Image (cartoon, rainbow, N blue to C red):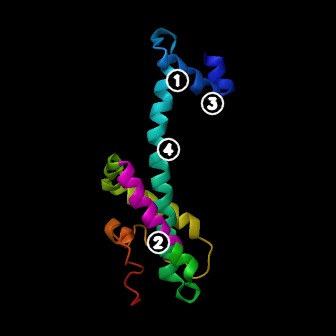
């Protein structure tokens, strides 16, 4: 069974589902089943963190490049907020991730790395000037720049 898992995880998953349906418990590849179940949660966390990074990077652009603001940036900000909201509705346990202060800090650092090198990005703070609530607020677009 390990060989099939390594060679074709889709065929392996189909095989494991068949074994479960047939209640052939002793033939299940439990180690890899556990790993795959744990990975489902990890991928959902990664997706949420990725969306938060994209959101914050676009808020940074919006805040620091007012001359370049456009519908595309606004659309991306709205889409990421909506997708994050949907992710949290579908997976309420992800709220705990957002409650962790390191989550926003990690997303901030990732966003900084994304936008570094673009025009008008200098002297950015080490931590986000926005709270998580602000970043996720559908009506929030800027910070302390009179926008």
Quadrant of the snapshot with the N terminus: top right
First of labels 3, 1 by sequence position: 3
Whole-angstrom CA distance, mark 3 to mark 2, is: 34 Å
Q: Which mark is residue 43?
A: 4
Whole-angstrom CA distance, mark 1 to mark 4, is: 21 Å
Q: Nearer the viewer, mark 3 or mark 1?
A: 1
- Image position, residue 92 (x, y; %): 33, 49
- Secondary structure category for the residue under label 3: helix
Whole-angstrom CA distance, mark 3 to mark 4, is: 17 Å
Determine the residue positioned at 52% across, 23% down: 17
Count residues near mark 1 (Cα–Cα under 10 Å), then give few for <14, some for 14-19, many for 20+.
Answer: few
- Image position, residue 109 (x, y; %): 48, 62
* Pick the front one: 38 or 104: 38
> In the rendered structure, are the residues bearing label 2 and label 1 in contact, judged by CB atoms less than 8 Å apart?
no
First of labels 3, 2 by sequence position: 3
Write down the residue under mark 1. 17
Is residue 41 visible in the rendered image? The answer is: yes
Considering every residue shown, the one lying at the far right of the view is: 7
Where does the magenta region start and end? Answer: 76-91
Write down the residue under mark 3. 10
> In the rendered structure, are the residues bearing label 3 and label 2 in contact, judged by CB atoms less than 8 Å apart?
no
Whole-angstrom CA distance, mark 3 to mark 1, is: 11 Å
From the image, give the main secondary structure of the stretch colored magenta.
helix
Residue 118 found in image quarter: bottom right
- Image position, residue 13 (x, y; %): 57, 27
Considering every residue shown, the one lying at the far top of the view is: 26
């Amino acid at each position: 069974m390990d060989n099939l898992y390594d060679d074709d995880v889709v065929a392996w998953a189909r095989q494991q589902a068949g074994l479960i349906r047939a209640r052939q418990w002793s033939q299940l590849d439990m180690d890899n089943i556990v790993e795959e179940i744990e990975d489902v949660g990890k991928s959902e966390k990664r997706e949420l963190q990725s969306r938060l990074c994209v959101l914050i990077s676009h808020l940074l652009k919006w805040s620091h490049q007012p001359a370049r603001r456009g519908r595309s940036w606004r659309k991306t900000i709205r889409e990421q907020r909506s997708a994050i909201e949907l992710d949290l509705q579908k997976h309420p346990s992800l709220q705990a991730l957002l409650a962790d202060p390191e989550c926003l800090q990690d997303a901030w650092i990732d966003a900084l790395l994304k936008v570094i090198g673009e025009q008008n990005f200098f002297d950015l703070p080490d931590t986000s000037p926005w709270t998580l609530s602000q970043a996720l607020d559908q009506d929030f677009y800027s910070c302390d720049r009179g926008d």
